[in-house]
Amino acid sequence: MFGYPIETVYLFVLIISGSLTFLYILLSDILDGILDVPDHPLFSPQLILSFFTVFSAAGYLFEKYTNMLSSVIGVVSAGISLIAVLLLHFFVFIPLRSAEASLHYTEADLEGSLAKVIVPVPADGFGEILIERTSGAVSKPAKSLKNDEIATGTEVVIIKMENGVATVAKHDPYHI
């Protein structure tokens, strides 16, 4: 191709696609923000770059170490690359996306949750509570529902979330 042996072409594609993959990993957040490309799960840049990297690596190795026809090597390399990219997509990228989505919560999700007071809540002021979730702990400013003073270490229930401030009441596990 273009006067170069096919091994050299595979090697150049491998070097270029491997380098672009590495750069994309480092700069993906910046590039996604600048380019604002719609995110399609099967046509994402990381999958396309991975396809070319695996395709060129397999093609180079087959050309170097076997006596198969170049057209057969191209088809076999494309098959290997397609299988590798599908495995990467279904067993790495999809679980990562679902894990990333599970860390997100809304203020409405916090209503009804139990929390612990970490900064005392004065009668007519604000304190701070700590809400422990499976994804980690979150602290929020809090005010008392009935303008009661709530001491540090008291367990409270979040009644309402409004503009990032939790309205809380003391939690009584024996009273429903």
Image (cartoon, helix red, strand yellow):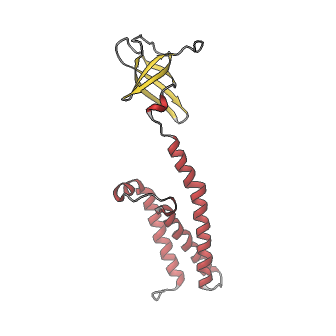
Q: Looking at the picture, tell me which residue is in the foreground, 38 or 95.
A: 38
Q: Looking at the picture, tell me which residue is in the foreground, 80 or 58.
A: 80
Q: Is residue 57 left or right of residue 67?
A: left
The image shows residue 97 at horizontal and vertical percentages of: 52, 50
Q: Residue at x 38, y 29 (%)?
A: 164
The image shows residue 76 at horizontal and vertical percentages of: 63, 76
Q: Quadrant of the C terminus?
A: top right
Residue furthest toward the right?
Answer: 67
Residue furthest toward the front?
Answer: 176
Res. 175 image quadrant: top right
Q: Residue at x 55, y 13 (%)?
A: 172
Counting the numbered discs, the total is: 0
Q: Is residue 103 above or below residue 16?
A: above
Q: Looking at the picture, tell me which residue is in the foreground, 156 or 152.
A: 156
Q: Looking at the picture, tell me which residue is in the foreground, 134 or 15.
A: 134
The image shows residue 135 at horizontal and vertical percentages of: 53, 36
Q: Is residue 82 left or right of residue 122?
A: right
Q: Residue at x 59, y 68 (%)?
A: 82
Q: Is residue 65 above or below residue 23?
A: below
The image shows residue 24 at horizontal and vertical percentages of: 43, 60
